[in-house]
Image (tube, rainbow, N blue to C red):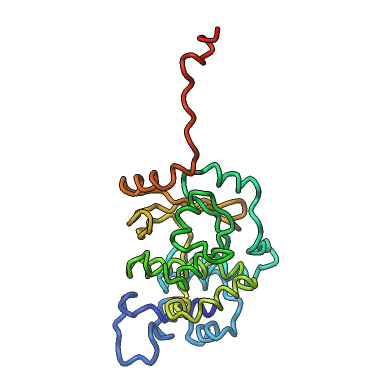
């Protein structure tokens, strides 16, 4: 919690909170005295909190800091979860391991969603299940080159990720991916799979800098534009549906324009199987009668 709060005030400029920047600053962001003034706290208390010597701040203190730091909705929720994990962990349910298999009914649902591409993701962005349409699209992108496939490893470690996204889209998706992973840390940060993922990608500068910035993000619907080897540029909407206790969630790929819809039809409709012919007049019940 101290590390998260420190990252937020180091990233906040005085001008963003109505203060005038004066003198040369040895460290980025707000000075302790400036934040203490904004939050109505003493500098000494803020120093204890920053150094982790005060591990039990009240709800009123956290609310004051959240307002002073202009925390977003996602950031406030993350701070609340950190506080709960720190002070009331025994009251919170223990998260299931990240590698839990999905329920059979969820696998059946994925199949029934064809020809809409859909996959099931876990807390560390392993793709734990998918339908045939998603496999058709993802195979050409290289997403299924690893076992298990993992969207964060793919984005930071697979060369194809830099080919399918332009520079701005790659960076925006990287921001989201690291923000999602940071948001999952209070629940799964001690899990072996979570630690192994962070270790695997931490050598990539684009990941390490974002991880150090400690941004958090919710798993929300959104749009993506990327290049597909078999269909050209695709514009899709990503719909997110949480499953059960939110240990897993469904991600659906929906076309967001007519060109993408036509490309989906061309690539995916055969996966749904042939449409049966309508019965001929000679085989209708009336004709047989």
Q: Nearer the viewer, residue 95 or 14?
A: 95
| Residue in front for this viewpoint, 168 or 142 | 142
Name the one closer to the observer, 121 or 1: 121
For residue 4, above or below residue 77: below
Asked if residue 282 is positioned above or below residue 171 in the image, the reply reads: above
Mark yes or no: residue 144 visible: yes
Total count of labels: 0
Q: Position of residue 239 (x, y in %)?
A: 45, 51
226 left or right of 271 in image: left
Q: Name above or below for residue 273 compared with residue 245.
A: above
Q: Which image quadrant is residue 230 in? A: bottom left
**What residue is drawn where x is 49% and y is 77%?**
5
Q: x and y percent of residue 166 in the render?
A: 32, 67
Q: At 50% from the left edge and 64% from the top edge, which residue is drawn?
A: 151
Residue appearing at x 45%, y 42% in the figure: 270
Identify the residue at image location x=51%, y=43%.
113
- Image quadrant for the C terminus? top right
Q: Is residue 254 above or below residue 35?
A: above
Where is residue 168, by image quadrant? bottom left
Q: Which quarter of the rendering shows the N terminus?
A: bottom right
Is residue 65 in view?
Answer: no
- Single out the residue that lies furthest toward the top: 289
Q: Which percent across, then down, holds residue 100?
A: 66, 59
- Residue furthest front in the image: 282
Quarter-wise, where is residue 58 in the image? bottom right
Location of residue 274 in the rendering, given as x and y in whole percent from the top left corner: 48, 36
């Amino acid at each position: 919690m101290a590390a998260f709060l420190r990252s937020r005030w180091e990233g906040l400029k005085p001008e963003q909170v109505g203060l005038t920047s004066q003198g040369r600053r040895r460290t980025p962001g707000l000075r302790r005295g400036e934040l203490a003034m904004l939050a109505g706290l003493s500098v000494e208390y803020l120093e204890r909190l920053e150094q982790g010597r005060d591990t039990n701040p009240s709800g009123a203190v956290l609310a004051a800091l959240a307002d002073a730091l202009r925390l977003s909705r996602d950031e406030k929720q993350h701070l609340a979860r950190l506080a709960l994990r720190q002070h009331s962990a025994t009251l919170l349910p223990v998260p299931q391991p990240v590698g839990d298999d999905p329920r059979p009914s969820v696998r059946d649902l994925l199949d029934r969603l064809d020809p809409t591409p859909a996959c099931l993701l876990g807390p560390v962005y392993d793709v734990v299940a998918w339908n045939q349409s998603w496999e058709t699209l993802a195979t050409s992108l290289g997403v299924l080159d690893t076992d298990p496939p993992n969207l964060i490893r793919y984005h930071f470690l697979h060369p194809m990720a830099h080919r399918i996204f332009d520079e701005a889209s790659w960076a925006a998706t990287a921001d989201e991916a690291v923000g999602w992973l940071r948001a999952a840390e209070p629940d799964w940060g001690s899990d072996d799979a979570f630690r192994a993922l962070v270790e695997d990608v931490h050598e990539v500068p684009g990941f390490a800098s974002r991880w150090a910035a400690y941004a958090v993000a919710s798993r929300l619907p959104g749009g993506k534009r990327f290049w597909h080897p078999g269909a050209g540029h695709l514009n899709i909407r990503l719909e997110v549906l949480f499953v059960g206790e939110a240990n897993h969630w469904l991600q659906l790929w929906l076309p967001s324009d007519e060109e993408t819809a036509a490309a989906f039809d061309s690539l995916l409709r055969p996966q749904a199987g042939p449409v049966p012919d309508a019965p001929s007049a000679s085989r209708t019940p009336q004709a047989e009668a």
